[in-house]
Image: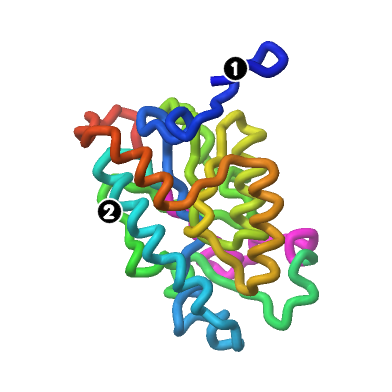
Amino acid sequence: MIRINDVDVFDTPEELLDPQHAAVLVIDMQKETASEEGGYAKHGYDMSRMRSIIPAIQRILEASRRLNLLIVFTEFVHRDRRGVTLVDGPGVYLHRLEKWISDVSDGSWAARTLDELASQRGELIMQKSRASALYGTYLDNIFRSREVRTVLLMGCLTDGCVLKTAVDVTEHGYYPAVVKDAVNSLTAEKHELGLKYIEMKFPTFSSDEVMAVWAGFPHREKRAAAADDP
């Protein structure tokens, strides 16, 4: 812990990654975005970048379950189950120069998280329609009820939803900890651009560094569910 302008600030990996107050957020690792049969693959995007981060995410999830961390999966949807759009002009403007823009409906095959990263009982799946996982969702309430201080971020895209969630996590009073080999973008240029900014502003760790810190913590028994838990 260091003190800056009369404020106590987490500083060490052990403080930031302490399982007593850490949660894990897997961002938008959906079939649309990371499957060889998804929309991006069908429109000529190389899925090897998205596929390459699956093993690191799996390692962190396995360790998180052993330590009984809160685990949340987000799924980006552009339309509700009736087909009504949930996005707006400013949100779509960001993608206006892309060769193709995804348009995923809630409840569809494309919206679901990859089978390789499937959630387990007690883990949360949360739909969102903005880049930040905290915008318009109840995630902040969940974090506060669990006394979370640090949120580990994994998934995609480094320059989009990961970056914007990291900013919003900070604005809500949590430390974002980005697992840098567990995030990626559709191109190397966009990934490197996003990661460079992230590394300047937020705590970043490799999955090996996270695992090394967590190796010093014992298995944690699953806590009894509270009456207001989802």
For the N terminus, the quadrant is top right
Bounds of the magenta segment? 72-92
In percent of width and height, residue 216 lies at 29, 34
Callout 1 secondary element: strand
Question: Taking the image as drawn, is residue 28 in sight?
Answer: yes
In percent of width and height, residue 19 lies at 36, 33
Question: Taking the image as drawn, is residue 79 in sight?
Answer: no
Counting labels gives 2
Residue that label 2 marks: 120
The numbered mark, 2 or 1, whose residue comes first in the sequence reads 1
Alpha carbon distance from label 2 to label 1: 35 Å
Q: Residues within 10 Å of mark 1 (few under 14, many from 20)?
A: few
Q: Was residue 11 drawn as part of the magenta stretch in this picture? A: no
Q: Was residue 74 drawn as part of the magenta stretch in this picture? A: yes
At x 61% / y 47%, what residue is drawn?
Answer: 165
Q: Which mark is residue 205?
A: none
Judge depth for marks 2 and 1 and give the one in front. Answer: 1
At x 68% / y 11%, what residue is drawn?
Answer: 6
| Picture layout, residue 150 above or below residue 80 | above
Task: Using residue 185 as the reference point, say whether residue 151 is left or right of it.
Answer: left
